[in-house]
Image (tube, coloured by chain):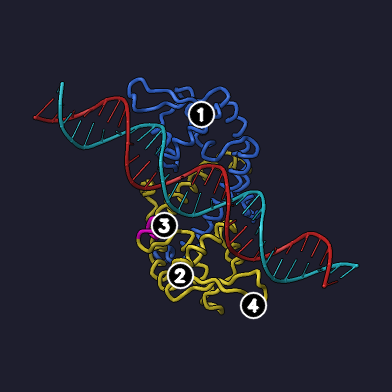
Chain colours: A yellow, B blue, C red, D cyan
Amino acid sequence: MEAESEVDVCAKWSETLRVYHNTSCELENELQSRHELGLSEFEVLLILGRTCGDQAEGKAKMKDIEAEMYLSQSALSRTVTRLEKAGLVTRAACDFDRRANFLMLTPSGRERFEAAKPTHRAVLVKHLTDTGASERAASCS
Amino acid sequence: MEAESEVDVCAKWSETLRVYHNTSCELENELQSRHELGLSEFEVLLILGRTCGDQAEGKAKMKDIEAEMYLSQSALSRTVTRLEKAGLVTRAACDFDRRANFLMLTPSGRERFEAAKPTHRAVLVKHLTDTGASERAASCS
DNA sequence: GAACCATACATGCACGCGCATTGGATGTCA
DNA sequence: TGACATCCAATGCGCGTGCATGTATGGTTC
């Protein structure tokens, strides 16, 4: 039963590689050109926007965001700095633990996020759906 | 029938993200620490080593390699420079088209590649096999 | 309270990447 | 032959990332 692994793992990996690169390249390009957002930046907004539906209004702690992303602590810190400079997010100290920071969507941030969401979804559908899975060139540009 | 796409695309994407990041992080770390090879560098060796079985003895043109990898032309050029500095590969001019470069595995390069191959395969099996698909922490280090 | 380690975030640094440009080698057409 | 478009590879540049470290706060133990 391990025979399957021994043979197909390579093919599985290159398929994963193909899908990942094509999708993330186009995500990056589309989000950047249409909404001036990097992919990491959008993903932070995505987490902030998602929690909003529940109880907190677009708030999240840095650590919680980090745990949900494939991004190092330092990279997240800088990504948030960029978002803050762009006025899409604000850092707010946590009352009970002054080491921690809350992150909050600004109105402008929510607006930008809502505008970018359809773009994001469209790219995912294009690349992850069987009907759209044909060999669209990679080329990353 | 498009309903499926509309709902599951996000989950599919985050699964792809998870597999890609976990696998490539561990590949990078293992190849670097055990064989002093970056992932891009190994992938170049992989292409050079693969063609060897056929007719050419570990040769390939830069352009052909580029076409098989998800790497820009400039990144490939520098990756090859690193491999060359490490003595694992040599650049050789092409007789018929002096714009093109051939790449050749050196004996030392082939040795390093053969040594690294099991490491590469082991990581792939660990992450891409159902029996090994349990939630191994990401953490990238 | 003092000493100690753990945690949260920011920052210095080196590195690999993509984009744009450059320079050299063909190929084409008149 | 000369002018021009095309192609291959190298390089300058800016950017985002991870690692290692620094700084401040929190928690625990005495």
> Which mark, residue A141?
none
- Is residue A32 found inside the magenta-colored segment of the image? yes
In the displayed structure, B78 sits above or below A47; it is: above
Give left or right: position of B82 versus A122.
right
**Mark 1 vs mark 4: same chain?**
no
Q: Quadrant of the N terminus of chain B?
A: bottom left
Q: Which residues are magenta?
A: A28-33
* SS under mark 1: helix
> Which mark, residue A27?
3
* SS under mark 2: loop
Q: Residue A127: percent from the left, percent from the top?
A: 41, 55
Q: Which residue is mark 2?
A: A88
Give the chain letter at badge 1: B
In the displayed structure, C7 sits above or below B139; it is: below
Q: Which residue is mark 4?
A: A95
**Mark 2 vs mark 1: same chain?**
no
Q: CA distance from mark 1 to mark 4?
A: 55 Å
The count of marks equals 4
